[in-house]
Amino acid sequence: MIAWRLADLEEARGKQEVFRRRSPRTLEALREHALNESALSSNRIEGVTVDPARVETVLFEKSQLRDQNEEEVRGYRKALERIHQGHANEHISIGTIQELHRVARAGLGDAGTFKSKDGDIIERYADGSVRVRFRPVSAAETPKSMHELVEGWNRCLEERWVHPLIALGAFSLDFLCVHPFRDGNGRVSRLLLILQSCLVGCEVCQYISLERLIEQNIERYYETLEIGSQGWHQASHDPWPYIGYVLFILKEAYGEFEERFGELESSRVGRRQ
């Protein structure tokens, strides 16, 4: 299954330049739509929502925002714009990750700073009961773990230990298991997914919202994340279901991209006739 998805993604990546040459205007329209969908979806996954009547104001206008939720939705869009504008020369570093967190969290509280206290990931049930779903890396060990994660990613890209898209999925899983920030880890993991996808040549993330696709397949996300986190501290975990999920999201994005590109092109032709 992994091999098939990699083959499909390689084929889809090969078509990107064709679409870029055919209609830059269509790509720009898709990019703008994806930015907006991503800012709303990625925050909504974490329970951060805004009044539908305020969406355009939050995303586009410079007027004063009403609350922290609106600040974070606008902040996420700004972080995405930063990625889209500078990804070609981007190098993943601790500073990059902390900056994405700072912008996405709108500079609020401890934005841009690694956690200072330990904390478990808790799952709460309707009857009031709770369970510890995962115990992340301690606050004391977080800087070391993040340094190793970033160094491993950059060395992997240079030395090509594995296919870059497999490294992409493995990095995402490891980041979520380290859980370096007090809050906002899920959102930063998705921002990094966008940035790293661009770096390895999967530019579809600029035109189709991966965050929306993750939201639409959220149960599978949590299921594969839990499988991948079991035994993670002992390096006895199984990362492949989560890696497969990431590849599935990218494949879905390429399929939707071709469909929506064709629809927009057809509508432009129709208007000219």
Image (cartoon, rainbow, N blue to C red):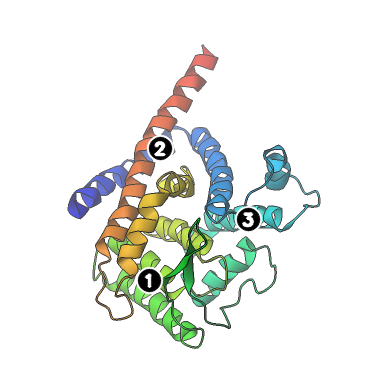
Tag 3's secondary structure? helix
Number of numbered markers? 3
Residue at image location 58% in from the left, 67% down from the top: 101
Look at mark 3 in the image and give the residue it sits on: 78
Tag 2's secondary structure? helix
User: Could you say which disc has been placed on residue 144 in the image?
Assistant: none
Q: CA distance from mark 1 to mark 3?
A: 25 Å
Q: Position of residue 69 (x, y in %)?
A: 68, 55
The foreground one among 53 and 22 is 53
Q: Are marks 1 and 3 in contact (CB under 8 Å)?
A: no
Residue at image location 64% in from the left, 53% down from the top: 73
**Is any part of residue 168 visible from this angle?**
no
On screen, residue 81 versus residue 127, left or right, reads: right
Look at mark 1 in the image and give the residue it sits on: 174
Q: Residue furthest right?
A: 64
The foreground one among 252 and 136 is 136
Tag 1's secondary structure? helix
Say which quarter of the image contains residue 246: bottom left
Lower sequence index among marks 3 and 2: 3
Say above or below: 6 vs 230. above
The foreground one among 70 and 128 is 128
Q: Residue furthest bottom?
A: 140
Look at mark 2 in the image and give the residue it sits on: 257
Q: Are marks 1 and 2 in contact (CB under 8 Å)?
A: no
Instruction: Look at label 1 and name its amino acid.
Output: Asp
Determine crowd level at label 3: few under 14, some 14-19, many 20+ residues with C-alpha closer than 10 A.
some
Instruction: Look at label 2 and name its amino acid.
Output: Phe
On screen, residue 51 versus residue 192, left or right, reads: right
Say above or below: 50 vs 241. above
Say which quarter of the image contains residue 131: bottom left
Instruction: Look at label 3 and name its amino acid.
Output: Lys
